[in-house]
Amino acid sequence: MKKEFFNEKMETMSFEELHSIQEEKFIKQIDYVWGKSPFYQKKFKEHGVERGDIRGLEDLHKLPFTEKDELRRSQEEDPPLGSHCAAPMDNIIRIHSSSGTTGIPTFVGITRHDHKVWTEITARSLFAKSVRPTDVMIHAVGLTFFVGGLPVKDATEHIGAAFVPIGTGASDRVVMTTKRLGGNLLHCTPSYAQYLADYVRKKQNMEPSELGFKKLVVGAEPGGGVPAIKKRLQEDYQCIVSEGLGNSDAAPIIFGECPAQQGMHFCAQEYIFPELIDPSSGDVLEMTDGAEGELVYTLLDRECCPVVRFRTRDRITIFSDPCECGRTSFRIRCIGRTDDMLLLLGVNVFPSAIKDVVTSFRPLTTGDMLILLDEPGPKVQPPLKVQVEYTQTVKDLTALKKDLENILREKLVFRADVELVPEGTLPRYEMKTKLIKKLFK
Ligand SMILES: [Zn+2]
């Protein structure tokens, strides 16, 4: 594999050297936060920690976690950006908003300096995902509000690739523009990539591979890392699929998957200090190969909305063995979000894992499915109701239902009640796919 980097020095740095840079930046940032953020001044005081107690990263665990709900409340009580905002409006150059999947959206502001940091991290991540100056990127993601929009434009331009802003809900324009401009790279959500594949087959009578993309760069939801969905997309488009992961409160894209396809590399080396924690006890876990837990971020270089020990709710697995691409950072796979997790007789089940099994049954299924919940999760009484779309190729519906239920039990250790519904019954999404339908009020 060709070893190529956006920032070779930072991306190939040894753990020890990077740690000392992180340490230095942490001390500076924690002084800044203590001095400028009323939210953290109050929070740290309530937690009984004083500035002198925190001498370096080894004391980070003494500081309390920050929850998304606290940021939301802080913004409601102290508008517009909340008391965690540590920069005056004069210095703020842009305000984004989180997608609001878990409640009322929150706003995130950035200063000119924060903008530079975001662009660098996002460019490293996109470069890991194989974006190069020669590429023509068809950007089928909305540019408004969402951090996957304008910040990706900035980072793509920073790399030197050509950015073609199309947005969502314009599939005909995606097809026409891709052909006329010779677009070779599609940037979108995995849901949209699946939607577009179906769309061109049905409406344009062509195979998705005929669009001519050589790279598919996806993110904003799990999918690019779900084995059956990745396989489906790579077969449909006949090209490599790489995924990324970001966080609107930290940076637009923080992890990027390199061509080795063994997880996404951490690309915010000196800008974010990541921790892995046990989501129930809050204990810090060692980031050893195969370790599983929730990601926590402490921003090391942020002016406007700094966060300390921010709980992302992203459940991840760590890969720490050396990667053939030459990057020295650890890699992750995102298993799902803690908010979506279901608990069946003590077993954790993530909707994306069910989707993986259902998609692996293609072409008997379309890959589309919906979990029906009678009661608020995460605890659910088995069997879990799952609607699955079958295709016209199925001869025996009873056998398919049984096979699906058996494999779900075998692979994910829970009992499902599969209801087969005809192709085209379930809603399709152009942004993020909803995998759960709540039947309760
Ligand atoms: Zn790699």
Image (cartoon, rainbow, N blue to C red):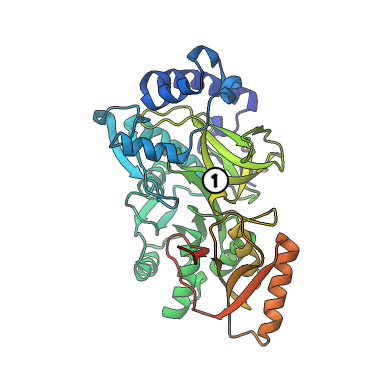
Query: Is residue 198 depicted above or below 116 in this figure?
Result: below
Residue at 54% across / 52% down in the picture?
243
User: Which kind of residue does numbered mark 1 sit on?
Assistant: Gly
The picture quadrant where one finds residue 390 is bottom right
Is any part of residue 26 visible from this angle? Answer: yes
Decide: is 230 above or below 299: below
At a point 44% along the width and 74% down the height, the residue shown is 199
> Within 10 angstroms of label 1, few (less than 14), some, or many (20 or more) residues?
many
Left or right, 280 with reference to 70: right
Q: Is residue 129 left or right of residue 93?
A: right
The quadrant of the image that shows the C terminus is bottom left
Q: Which residue does the image show at 64% across and 33% down from the upper left?
A: 283
Q: Position of residue 385 (x, y in %)?
A: 60, 69
Query: How many numbered marks does the figure carry?
Result: 1
The residue that appears at 41% across and 55% down in the rendered structure is: 136
Q: Residue furthest left?
A: 90
Q: Is mark 1 within 8 Å of ligand 1?
A: no
The relative height of residue 57 versus residue 297 in the rendered view (above or below) is above
Quadrant of the image where one finds ligand 1: top right
Percent coordinates x, y for residue 44 in the rendering: 47, 22
Q: Nearer the viewer, residue 143 or 38?
A: 38
Whole-percent x and y of residue 344?
66, 58
Q: Secondary structure under badge 1? A: strand
Task: Write down the residue under mark 1.
Answer: 256
Report x, y in % for residue 168. Answer: 37, 62
Can residue 109 be seen in this snapshot? no
